[in-house]
Amino acid sequence: MPFKAEVRTLPNGLRLIVSRDATAPVAAVCLWLRAGSRDDPPGRTGLAHLFEHLMFQGSTHVPPGGHTAAVEDGGGFTNASTGFERTTFYSVVPAGMLELVLWLEADRLGGMLDALTPQSLATQRDVVLNERRERYDNVPYGTGWETLVAMSFPPRHPFHSTPAGSPEDLATVTEDDCRAFFHRHYTPDRALLSVVGDVDPEAVATLVERHFGHLTPSSPAPGGTECSRTPGPPTDPRRHLVQAVPGPAFMAAFQLPPYGEPAGVAADLAVTLLGGMSSRGLHDRLVRNDQIAHRARASLMPLYAAPSLGRLDIRALPGTDLDLVEKTVDEETERIVGTGVTETALEGARAQLRRDWLDRLAHPGSRAEELCAGEAYLGDATVMDGRMNRIQEITEDDIRAVAAEHLRPGNRAVLTYEPRAQGAPA
C-alpha cells in the first residue's frame, strides 16, 4: 500500500510533508515537535506534557480555548499527545478548512507565549495533576509502567521519567521555565508539519510558506541529551510492592533494540509471540489453559534514541503464586529461544502486526503522524511503506536470536504486586 509523499524544507528549517489522498474530502494536519519527556530539564519532569496543554490556551491572535473551538465548529476534531521523544498536535477537518488549521498552528507555534499568564499556567498545572491522579495515582497498578521505566534506566538517563512527570516537579514549574522551553524546542527548525488528504501539494506548500515562513528558527539549534542506544541490564532489576490492588500481578520490562533498526522488527515479533494472543504463549497458558490469570499481555514501547522496551503485564487471580507465573514466563521465553516457533504461530504474529499497522494507516490523522515519525527518526517520510515487507521477511532464526539476546531473565526489570491485607496500614 504505497503512500506518496512530497517533502520540502522551508528556509527557516520547517520540514513539510504532503501526501495526497482523494478517497475522502478531508485533510489531516500533524504538527510534530522534537520535544518529549526526554527533554524535560532536571527537576522539571512533566514539563513537556504540561506544555502540550498550554498550547491550547491561546496565542497571539487566538483566545484561550479558541483553537479547539474553531476546529470543532467547522466539523473537525483536534487533539495532542506527548511521548518520550516527541509532542504532536493533530487535527482532521473537511478539506476546505485546511488553511484555517494551518493558520491556527502557525499562530501558536509563533505566538503561544503571548497568551501565557500565571493564571493559565496554574490552571493547566491543575489539569495535568488531576489527569495524573485519574490515570496513574488513584488506579490499581496505575504507576506500574512508570516504575518499570525508572527501573530500566538510571536516574540521570533522559528516559528515566515518563511524560506524566512527578507531582513535586510539576508544582515547581514557573513561567520562566515555560518560556525557556518554548524558545528551545518550539521553533520551526525543530518542527515537522505533515498534511494528508484531498489536497494539492503545491497549494499546500504555498499556504505553509504564507503562514509559517516568517517564523524564526532557534539559534543555536539545541541538541538533546545523548544516551546509549545499546540494550543492557536494568539499573534496578526487581521490586515488590504491597498495595491495595485486586490481586497479585507480575510486570516486566525488557530492553530491546531501538525502533527502526533491523533487529527492531524481529524484537516486535518476538514480544508478540511471547504474549501469545493469536497462538501459543503467555495468554494461551496463563489465561486459557491454566486459568491462573485474567490478563497476560505483551507489548512494545518503541523508542528511537534509546533501547525500546518490551512490556509484560500479567494480572493473576487472587491467591496465585507469582513464582509460578514467573516460571511460566521463563518457560515460554526458553521455548522461543530453544525450539523456536512454528510457521503457523509466526504467521499469526505477522498477521497481528500487519492488522495493527493497517488499522493505523487507515486513519489520515495517524498516517500524518507516521509520515512525521519516519522523517524525524529515519530521515525518510515514506519508510512506512516497507514496514509490512520487513515484517514478512523476518525468519524464525531472527526471532530466536533476538529472544536469546534480549528476552533473557537478566535483561528484564521485574515489578510484582501483592494485595495488602484488609485493615493493614498503607
Image (tube, rainbow, N blue to C red):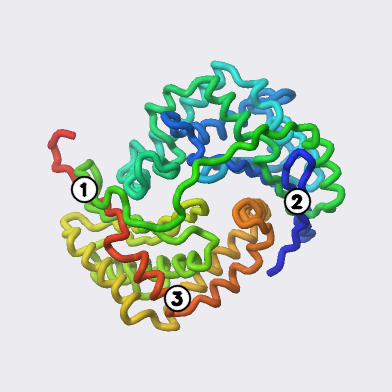
Q: Tag 2's secondary structure? A: strand
Q: Amino acid at mark 2?
A: Val
Query: Which circle's residue, 2 or 3, is located before the other in the chain?
Result: 2
User: Dot 2, how many residues are within 10 Å of its Cα: few (below 14), some (14-19), or many (20+)?
Assistant: many
- Quarter holding residue 272: bottom left
Q: Which residue is mark 1?
A: 240
Whether residue 265 sits left or right of residue 251 in the image: it is right
Confirm whether residue 336 shows in the render: yes
Residues at marks 1 and 3, CA–CA distance in whole angstroms: 34 Å
Q: Amino acid at mark 1?
A: His
Residue at point 76% right, 47% down? 9
| Mark 3 lies on residue | 398
From the image, state whether disc 2 or disc 3 is nearer to you.
3
Residue under the image location 22 percent in, 45 percent down: 241
Q: Nearer the viewer, mark 1 or mark 2?
A: 1
What x and y, as percent, mark residue 267?
44, 66
Place of residue 423 in the rendered image (x, y in percent of width and height, measured from the top left): 13, 36
Q: Quadrant of residue 189?
A: top right
**Residue depicted at x 18% and y 34%:** 426
Residue neighbourhood size for the residue with mark 1, other residues' Cα within 10 Å, grouped as few (<14), some (14–19), many (≥20): few
Q: Residue at x 55, y 68 (%)?
A: 355
Q: Are marks 1 and 2 in contact (CB under 8 Å)?
A: no
User: Residue most toward the front?
Assistant: 220
Secondary structure beneath dot 3 equals helix
Q: Quadrant of the N terminus?
A: bottom right
